Amino acid sequence: MNWAVSRSSVHFETALINAMITGIRNTLVQLRSWTDVRRIALDLYPDRREAQQAIAALRSLSLENRRIRHLTRSVKVDGRIHQVMSRPGWPSPAWDRFVRNELLRLRPAPGERPGIQVLIVAMTRKCPLACAHCCEGDHLNQRDVLSTDDVLAIIASFRARGCAQVELSGGEPLNRFNDLLRIVRESATEAMDLWVLSSGWGLTDERAAQLREAGLTGMSISVDHWDPEAHDRFRGRHGSFTHARNAVRQARKAGLVAAVSLVPTRSFCRLDDLLRYADMAADLGAHFIRIVEPRAAGNYADQDVELGGAEHAVLDQFVRLVHTDGRYRHHPIVDHYGSYQRAVGCSGAGRRFLYVDTNGEVMTCPFCRAGCGNALTTPLDLIEKELRERHGCARYATV
C-alpha cells in the first residue's frame, strides 16, 4: 500500500476497532481498576488511614499523567486492558505488582521496598541493520558477551526484587531466536509482563506464535516513517520497512500486543507526516505508537539531533489530536513519554526503569549512560545505592 494517501482511502482492521475502549466504557474500566488498587493498598498498609493516603497520592499522580499525556482510551488484548506500554495489562498479578511498587514509592511501608517497574535488557549485539540512531552502535555485531544463562540470571534477580515488566532489546533479539524463545519461556511468570523491542527483521507467523505461546506479552516494532524508502534509509538496509510492516501484522495475528516505535527526526515533526504515520499504524493493526525522541547517544553521540520547542509543540499537538478528536478514536494509543518528562521530570532514571547494556552494565536508561555496576557481578543493593545517591536523569529532574 502507498502510505502517501489521504485518510479516506485507509481502511482500519475491524479487530483493532473492536479492541479499542473509548468514552464511557474506558471510564468504567478505569474505575474498576481502582477497586483493585484499593485492595492492594489495604493489604499493604496495616493502618487504614495510611492506605487511603497512599491511594490518594497515586490517584493524584495518575490524573497528572493522564492530563499531560492526554490518556483517553485503552485497548483490550487477550482479556487484559492496556493503556500505557510501560505498565502491565490489567487485571493480572504483574499489574498488581506494578501498583504495589508505585504505592511504596509514594508512601513507604515498614519492611517493604519498591521494585523496578521496567527492566530493559540489551541481550545481543547482533543486528542485520545499521540504524542511524542505534544506542549500541559502538558494539554492534561484535561478539556477544551475555550468554542466555546470563540474561536469565539478570531477569531472575530483578524479578525477585519486584520488577513488573521486562523489555528485551539489542541489537536485534530475533537474531538469537532460539535463545530469545528460551529466555521468554523460562522468565514468563504471571508476576511480570515480557516485551521484545525489535526491527521485525526475521519474524514470521510461526515465530510470533511460538513467542506468544512461550509467554510473551507484546512486541514493539521500529517503524520510522510512513514512506518505505525513508524508513529503509534511516535503518540502513533496503527491505527493512517490509519486514517491519509484516512483523506488526504477525505480532497482532499471534495475539500479542502490537506496537510501532517511532524516532521522529526534526524533519519528520510535521503534523501531516505524523498523521499519515498514525493512519499507517492503524491500518497495520497496531495497538500502540511509541514515540522515542532522539538523543545524542550511541550513533547520535555528539550530533545535533535533539528536538526543540517547535518540534515538541507539534508532537504534543499530534498526541492531543489523536487522543481527543473523534475522527481518530479507533487509531492506536500514542505513548509519548517525552511530554511528561518536560512537564514534570523523569520518573524512570534508575528509579522506575533501568537499562542493562550488552556488557551487562547497569545504566539509568539507554540514553543516560553512566555505569552503576554490573548486573551479574555487583550486588543489587550496591547498584540501587549508586543510582539513588549519584545518578539520575542527565537531562531532566528525577521524580
Image (spheres, grey):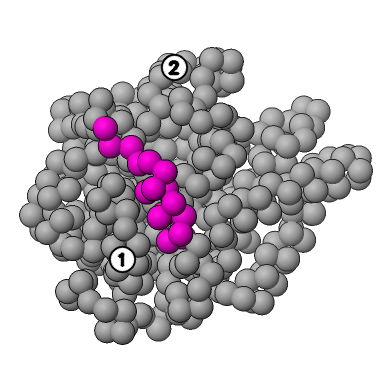
Q: Is residue 46 above or below residue 16?
A: above
Q: Main secondary structure of the magenta part?
A: helix
Q: Does residue 219 appear in the picture of this structure?
A: no
Camera-side mark, 1 or 2:
1
Q: Which residue sits furthest front?
A: 310
Residue ID for mark 2:
373
Q: Which mark is residue 218?
A: none
Instruction: Give left or right: position of 238 versus 321.
Output: left
Q: Is residue 360 above or below residue 22?
A: above
Outermost residue, left direction? 238
Question: Which of the 4 image quarters holds residue 365?
Answer: top left
Query: Can the viewer see residue 294?
Result: yes
Q: Residue at x 31, y 65 (%)?
A: 272
* Amino acid type, callout 1: Asp
Relative to 84, is 276 on the left or the right? left
Query: Which quadrant, please, contains the C terminus?
Result: top right
Q: Are marks 1 and 2 in contact (CB under 8 Å)?
A: no
Q: Circle 1 is placed at which residue position?
A: 272
Residue at (41% x, 54% y) in the render: 315
Magenta-tinted stretch: 304-319
- Circle 2 residues within 10 Å: few <14, some 14–19, many ≥20: many
